[in-house]
Amino acid sequence: MKTEILGLLMVMLLVSCKEEPQMVQREIKQYTIDQFMDNESVGGGSFSYDNNNLLVSSNRSGIYNIYTIPVKGGEMTAITASDSTSVFAESYFPNDNRMLYSADGNGDEIDHLFVRELDGSIKDITPAEGAKAGFYGWSKDKNHLYYGSNKRDPRFFDVYKLSIDDYTSEMIYQNNDGLDYSEMSDDENFIALSKVMNTNDSDLFIYNVKTKETAKINENRSANSAQDFSVDNSTFYYTTDDGGEFSYLMSYDLETKEKKKVVEKSWDIMGSGFTSQGNYMVVYTNEDGKNAIDILDAKTMQPIDMPDFDNKSITSVNFSDNEEWMRMYVGGSNAPSDLYTYNLKTKEQYKLTHVLNDAIDAEDLVNAKVIRFNSFDGTEIPAIYYLPYQASETNKVPALVWVHGGPGGQTRQNFSSLIQYMVNHGYAVLAVNNRGSSGYGKTFFKMDDKNHGEKDLQDCVEGKNWLAEQPEIDGEKIGIIGGSYGGYMTMAALTYTPEEFDVGVNLFGVTNWLRTLKSIPPYWESFREALYLELGDPYSADSVRLRRISPLFHTDKVTKPLIVLQGSEDPRVLQVESDEIVAGVRKNNVPVEYVLFEDEGHGFVKKENQIEAYSRILKFLDRYLKKEHLPVEGEVPKIEIEEEE
């Protein structure tokens, strides 16, 4: 049933009609967190060399491991059985069934690359202690793989070429200038490099391996991002927002230096690339927080026919090397993404997964609605709104303002078990894309520069005010929730606008900007200066402002109940951030709950920890926002709504 049904009913009562709609009762079941977390999350999807199987990651065991699944569907076969560190599929090898995967140390983000050999043994092919490694792709001759590593200098990632026969490697690009590797032509003659100028703008370069010359692509300060090289190695493709608000796709002739606009839309083009043989170009567009994907015939640049999934969206695609098969993820805000395959020759389509827990009725999940409201200064703020089915003027529900991570992130129209869990239990959620969020043009993106915890916080307050005006919302029961930068915004709200929100949920949020900006991991070196430009330099006069906007130094202002959740292995927001904010707020005799996970990093990936975290959040909200007695353990209440027959 659509979330708009109550509003539709109100309209129908006000207009003349020959016959009143007949109404029936439908039960909406409330689900436990265990049931929501019994949804499966599947990612990746590399085709085997013979196109018989896909290599994927799944958390069905409670933690991410890698699996294979037949391309036409069937049972998943577990390849790894980690019970501590998450394991993520990278790719099948191009000529045999060896498998490449990555893993870190319980969330510490020090990733290594591993090979699962044909005999089942595991080999770490990037064993340098303390160094990160990332997979960049396969060579055209299929005898090598490329990867990046900061083993030479912890600040910078060099590019290596590794033989897949004996796993010996050689450095093919030494990064002495803090540039970031982006793409390489198949003939290895051209490497695309970028340099971050600020959190919006990047300079783009092409390095000629033969001549050792580096050519700058962009002429003006703008956001530039490498996308791909043509299969004949003659043309480079990149996105830029030069002269406009949104990023569009450009081509650059490597010989003549001629530039041409290839694709432009009224939203950001997020990415683009060619399939292996070059017959298709894939274009990703961020349309109001939702992925829109075009598969273009590379010769005509016209879109090819794609399968139709009604109210769901294709969120990701990948092709087999021979371009006969395409794998797709399909989902939406009210449906976790399932994996499909599609044969471009036969037009046959196969559904490989069913990730939604069978115990959950898909009709009970709420579809997100994009809304907009005006902030304190007239700026239009986009937001994504989830309204519980049971909400009405006579049954007002509490609500939460959800703040995304960043700064510079964006809440998108994707499925979230936590959001659906809270909505299912009677909480409306307004995910505010406050000023400074990406996806709405570069002017909007830059609006929060050195305004963090100030104007962007006021956007969140205005989101609360918008909620309070909705007839289905209890305006006296509105909280704020967020993770990472959103966790900072939660603490800023409770500190600097202490009477606006009734509770706060802080998931691993920054509370001391001076310490956080000084403790940036060395491998963020290329991004560090840009972050300082946006937020402030902790070693300069900016430190005064950074202290002023850091909630840790103003905990005496907090008067509302708070829950804090943190991972001990988090390298971005250190545990001490949460330890100290909890201790500071507790001095006010304010209810504070603290949930600490010893085996998690920046975000919780283990199902048992997610279950504990999300159940603790709901119990906290029930106690301090709903202010109701908690239900008996194991009791599954039902609610009823009216629905047209």
Image (cartoon, rainbow, N blue to C red):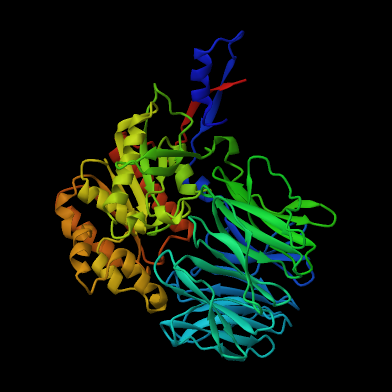
Q: Position of residue 354 (x, y in %)?
A: 65, 49
Q: Residue at x 43, y 39 (%)?
A: 372
Q: Quadrant of residue 68?
A: bottom right
Q: Residue at x 45, y 34 (%)?
A: 387
Q: Position of residue 200 (x, y in %)?
A: 43, 63
Q: Residue at x 71, y 84 (%)?
A: 143
Q: Which of the image's four quarters has the C terminus?
A: top right
348 on left or right of 226: right
Q: Residue at x 43, y 25 (%)?
A: 392
Residue sitting farthest toward the top: 18
- Is residue 473 visible in the rendered structure shown here? yes
Figure disc tally: 0
- In this view, 229 is above or below 619: below
32 on left or right of 616: right
Q: Position of residue 280 (x, y in %)?
A: 73, 62
- In this view, 635 is above or below 602: above
Q: Position of residue 177 (x, y in %)?
A: 44, 84
Q: Quadrant of residue 484?
A: bottom left
- Is residue 622 visible in the rendered structure shown here? no
Q: Quadrant of residue 259?
A: bottom right
Q: Which of the image's four quarters has the N terminus?
A: top right
The one of 281 and 587 positioned closer to us in this rendering: 281
The one of 176 and 24 positioned closer to us in this rendering: 176
The one of 118 and 184 positioned closer to us in this rendering: 184
